[in-house]
Each structure stands twice: as C-alpha cells, then as structure tokens.
Amino acid sequence: MSHADEQGGKSVLETHGYILSKTIGQGSYATVKTNLVSLSSSSSSCMCSYLSRVLTEAYSETHHSVVAIKIISKRRAPPDYLRKFLPREIDVVKTLKHPFLVLFLQCIETTQRVYIIMEHASKGDLLSRIRDLGKIDEHQAGVWFTQLVSAIEYCHSRGVVHRDLKCENLLLDQFNVLKVTDFGFARGGMKPTRGTYPLSQTYCGSYAYASPEILTGTPYVPQMADIWSMGVVLYVMVFGRLPFDDSNHRKLLKQVTEGPIFPETDKVSRDCRIFIKKLLSRLELRLSVSQIQSDGWFKRFPPPGTVLWKPTSNRSRQSTS
C-alpha cells in the first residue's frame, strides 16, 4: 500500500472512529496493522494462493477496545476474489455469533478498499504459541480442541464450512480462549438435504492441512474436510510438527493415504494418538462431529464453559464513496 493509499485509508477509518497504529504485515492486496501483537504465520503451500491473508489492528472509539481490521485493496485484488470469495466471507461472518469465533463487528466499503473490522485476540495465533513452547501439553491441547470443535459444530449446524482451518487461523484472546478466524474460503448454504451433503469443488486451503479427497481433486464433503484439518491441528499441537510433508505433492498424497506416523514420546497418551488417527482417516472411517464428541479421549475434557464475551450491537456494512 502506497503512502497516499495508506493516508486515504487512515482517513476513512478515523472517520468511523478507528485509530490505526503500525502495519505488521502486507500481502499482495491486503494490509495488516496492529498496536499490540505481531501475528506470525507460516509460509505454506496454498491451493488458492491469491487469497493471501492480511490483518490490521487499531483502537475503536465506538467499541472502546482494540479491534482487528483486514484491509483489502480492490485495485490489487484478483477479480475472482472480489466477485466470489470476499462477498461470501462478509455474508458468512455477519451471520455468525459464537464465543469461540472471532466476532465480526463492521464492514466499510469505499471505491478503493474494503475494511473488515473484527474482535481483537490479544495473545496472537496458535502457531506462534506452538513455536514459542515447542509443543502444547496434552491437557491444554484438549481444552483448545474442545473449543475448536464447539465452534465448528456451530458453523456446520448453520450450513457454514470453513475450508481453511490451520494453526495460523486459530487465535487466542486475553483469557487464553481459542477463537477461529479467517473465513476467506468459507461458504454458506452447505446444509445436507435428506441426509445428503452438497459437494464442494473449490480446492482451497493449505496443502499440509488438506484431506486426501481435496489433494486428489475429488468433489468432497467440506464438513469432513474441516474435520481432517482439525486432526492436523491437534497433531501439530501435541507433537509440535506437521504430520505430513507438504514439500512434494506426490509424497504428501502417499503419506495422507497411509495415515500419520507418530514420533517416539511418552508425553502423548495412546488414547490421544488413536483419536488423531480417527480424524486423519479415509473418508468412510473419519469421525463426524457427533462421534468426536462421544469419543473417550475427547470426553476427558470439560465441555467448553461460559466465556466472558460481550457481543456488540454495531455489526453493519457501510458504503462510502
């Protein structure tokens, strides 16, 4: 973003009561700012690489708190993204309200840019936490995993699929509560009809978190692809590494077909390993959300409790010339 563009964007946001601070990251057509934390993400292969994510943070005089702002340049964004994915993202996040989802606050659209304002998660992303600690102990991983399952169960019950679940897209708030974010590849209207799920043919997300059916280019049930991705997230939390090598597509496809290999360690229980295997299984054997919730390992952890969470009433999309 040029200096002139940045000043123009700053002026628009200040008009709406947002005080920006420094930029922490830039993508090909979006900008990220923050005044509290630096959100780091891994550079992983992506099947829709034009949708690189960017994020911004600022103080909101309206909400009396720090918020996150995603700034998308219409001039630099691909037409397909502006026509298809961005409207989907906005339509989806406006309908979702759950304690383990990053809360959408407002969308401002100008002739040059789109600003998506969201709840701020002050403790950064899960990937950064794993990098700092090396790995997450099994109990804490279980607590966060129950929160993730609760969020995704809610989304799926509303016909929304995420399609890009990964550690970079899971944030931690001031209470150390996990929040799912980045619905750039999400899609609504995916509820089953008479027990039959609509299939998706958009192969998006990161290769390292992609299910076998996505990697083979097969029309897939996106809810089950989300569950595979959750299995990868849990593996990364407890082992501190990816279960599959995504540097070579042929090698990756062979590995996901054969299933995960677990490192030698006594820190992760046998029950946890078996549970992960059930998530990273071929489609007909993979656990559904209800089966996840009835699994013995999952039931070790208390169900997600009441979270200190206050929804805001200012959730709107505004147009500015």
Image (cartoon, rainbow, N blue to C red):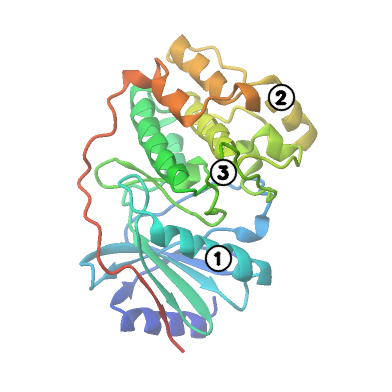
Q: Are marks 2 and 3 in contact (CB under 8 Å)?
A: no
In the current view of this chain or complex, which residue is farthest to the front? 194
Viewer-closest of 69 and 24: 69
Instruction: Give the quadrant of residue 77.
Output: bottom right
Q: Is residue 22 left or right of residue 91?
A: left
**Where 115 falls versus 124 (above or below)?**
below
Work out which residue is located at the far bottom of the displayed protein and give it. 321
Q: Which of 116/120 is in front?
A: 116
Residue closest to the eye, 93 or 27 = 93
Q: Residues within 10 Å of mark 3 (few under 14, many from 20)?
A: few
Label 1 sits on a secondary structure element that is helix
Q: What residue sits right under mark 3 in the picture?
A: 193
**Residue at screen point 59% across, 25% down:** 280
Tell me the residue that label 2 is attached to: 257
Tell me the amino acid under the disc marked 1: Leu
Q: Position of residue 305 (x, y in %)?
A: 23, 35
Image vertical order of residue 254 relative to residue 131, above or below? above
The amino acid pointed to by label 2 is Thr
Q: Going from the N terminus, do you reach mark 2 or mark 1 first? A: 1
Residue labelled with disc 1? 86
Question: Seen in the image, is 128 located left or right of residue 44?
Answer: left
Quadrant where the N terminus sits is bottom right
Percent of width and height locating residue 183? 50, 54
Label whose residue precedes the other's in the sequence (1 or 3): 1
- Return the mark for residue 223: none
**Dot 2: element:** helix
* Residue at point 61%, 59% (across, down): 51
Query: How far separated are the C-alphas under marks 1 and 3?
Result: 26 Å
Q: In the image, residue 122 lies at what x, y percent?
A: 31, 51
